[in-house]
Image (cartoon, rainbow, N blue to C red):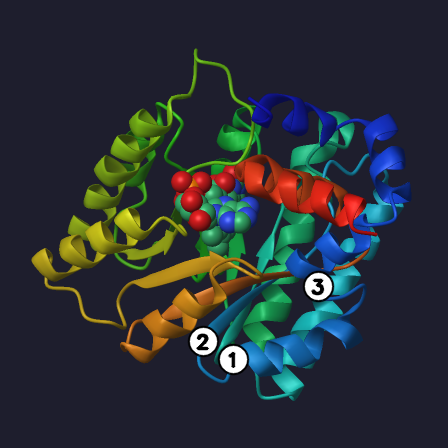
């Protein structure tokens, strides 16, 4: 019931001002975000990579300012240099939202985003790690997959996210299930219309399994991004049935969610990667985490009452 209003609020400047001024927001943000800058995020990376892998997201999205898009690219270059120099690049890669590097900058947005993503991919290549393109709302999917195709010509290690709730995704999984292709499959975090997406939880779960089957039976590298124990169990069965070993698929969860389960799966010998966001532009990311789980709203309300 709260999901749609929370996801609408995620794109509202007024809601942003209210939420940012709410005193107990900070504690909740700290649960999901590793720090305001690279320096404060790196200890988390060092800690998590003791038993798991990491993908780092420099927070930001829906950028309408060229200078901000450039600053985001520089932040990724700095991050990737630090991963390379710190010996972390074997266990840490980066996730990038194309809307943070220019995709929405008018008629030239797509080519600006492509050029900027190229710079990030160059820096990842120099550091010896990989890049995954996050997927945003359904209006961006064709553009993001187009940019992915262009990037992969020179940087075949660039992967992308597909969202199981979209009707188109099984077909996209087929297109991206070839050798060398890295696909992170998630359920999907945006408020999408029924014309393009399943909206019922059970339908989304069934769609997730259909898409995952295509990826596991293909020749690429599937990345199972879900905290749902059923999806994780089914992924294990599909991987075994397809003859996959622990190093030709992986599991992914978000920083601050099911932490013990992440370590348990890693201890079982599975490749487990944690999505670690950092930076000051946390509002949209944080609101999507609230929308995913009503209990997070209760936690927020309780901390208000007990202050
Ligand atoms: P759900 O059925 O939503 O949740 C299963 C269980 O997980 C819940 O019962 C609860 O115990 C726990 N849980 C789930 N969410 C939360 C939460 N916020 N707080 C506390 N507990 C929770 N979405 C996109 O649209 N684009 C992306 O690029 C993208 N990248 C992602 C990358 C990673 C590594 C992950 C893990 C998710 C990503 N997502 C992305 C988000 C994803 O689409 C879902 O919104 C999110 O993962 C919740 O779905 P679920 O599969 O965990 O299943």
Q: How many marks?
A: 3
Give me the residue at 71% from left, 33% from top: 109
Q: CA distance from mark 3 to mark 1?
A: 19 Å
Q: Nearer the viewer, residue 115 or 209?
A: 209
- In what element is the residue under mark 1? loop
State if disc 1 and disc 2 touch (CB < 8 Å). yes
Q: Which mark is residue 76?
A: 3
Whether residue 151 is visible to the viewer of this picture, yes or no, is: no
Above/below status of 91 relative to 4 = below
Q: Nearer the viewer, residue 245 or 139?
A: 245
Tell me: 88 left or right of 14.
left
- In what element is the residue under mark 2? loop
Q: CA distance from mark 2 to mark 1?
A: 5 Å
Give me the residue at 47% from left, 60% from top: 258
Percent position (x, y) of residue 139?
56, 24
Whether residue 73 is visible to the viewer of this picture, yes or no, is: yes
Which residue is disc 1 drawn over? 49
Give me the residue at 65% from left, 57% from top: 32
Above/below status of 100 relative to 46 = above
Q: Tag 2 or tag 3, which sits nearer the N-term? A: 2
């Amino acid at each position: 019931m709260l999901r749609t209003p929370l996801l609408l609020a995620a794109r509202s400047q007024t809601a942003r001002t209210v939420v940012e001024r709410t005193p107990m927001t900070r504690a909740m943000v700290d649960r999901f975000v590793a720090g305001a800058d690279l320096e404060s995020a790196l200890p988390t990376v060092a800690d998590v990579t003791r038993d798991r892998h990491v993908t780092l997201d420099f927070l930001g999205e829906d950028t309408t300012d060229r200078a901000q898009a450039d600053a985001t690219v520089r932040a990724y270059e700095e991050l990737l240099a630090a991963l390379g120099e710190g010996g972390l690049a074997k266990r840490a890669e980066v996730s990038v939202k194309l809307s943070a590097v220019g995709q929405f900058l008018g008629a030239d947005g797509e080519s600006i985003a492509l050029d900027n993503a190229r710079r990030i991919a160059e820096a990842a290549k120099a550091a010896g790690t990989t890049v995954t393109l996050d997927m945003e709302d359904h209006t961006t999917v064709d553009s993001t997959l187009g940019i992915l195709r262009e990037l992969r010509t020179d940087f075949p290690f660039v992967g992308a996210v597909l969202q199981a709730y979209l009707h188109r995704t099984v077909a996209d999984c087929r297109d991206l299930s070839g050798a060398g292709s890295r696909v992170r499959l998630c359920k999907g975090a945006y408020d999408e219309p029924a014309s393009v997406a399943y909206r019922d939880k059970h339908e989304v779960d069934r769609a997730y399994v259909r898409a995952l089957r295509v990826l596991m039976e293909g020749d690429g590298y599937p990345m199972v991004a879900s905290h749902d124990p059923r999806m994780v169990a089914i992924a294990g069965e599909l991987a075994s049935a397809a003859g996959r070993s622990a190093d030709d698929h992986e599991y992914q969860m978000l920083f601050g969610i099911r932490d013990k389960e992440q370590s348990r799966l890693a201890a079982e010998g599975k490749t487990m990667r944690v999505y670690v966001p950092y930076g000051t532009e946390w509002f949209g990311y944080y609101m999507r985490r609230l929308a995913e789980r009503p209990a997070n709203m209760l936690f927020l309300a309780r901390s208000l009452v007990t202050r």
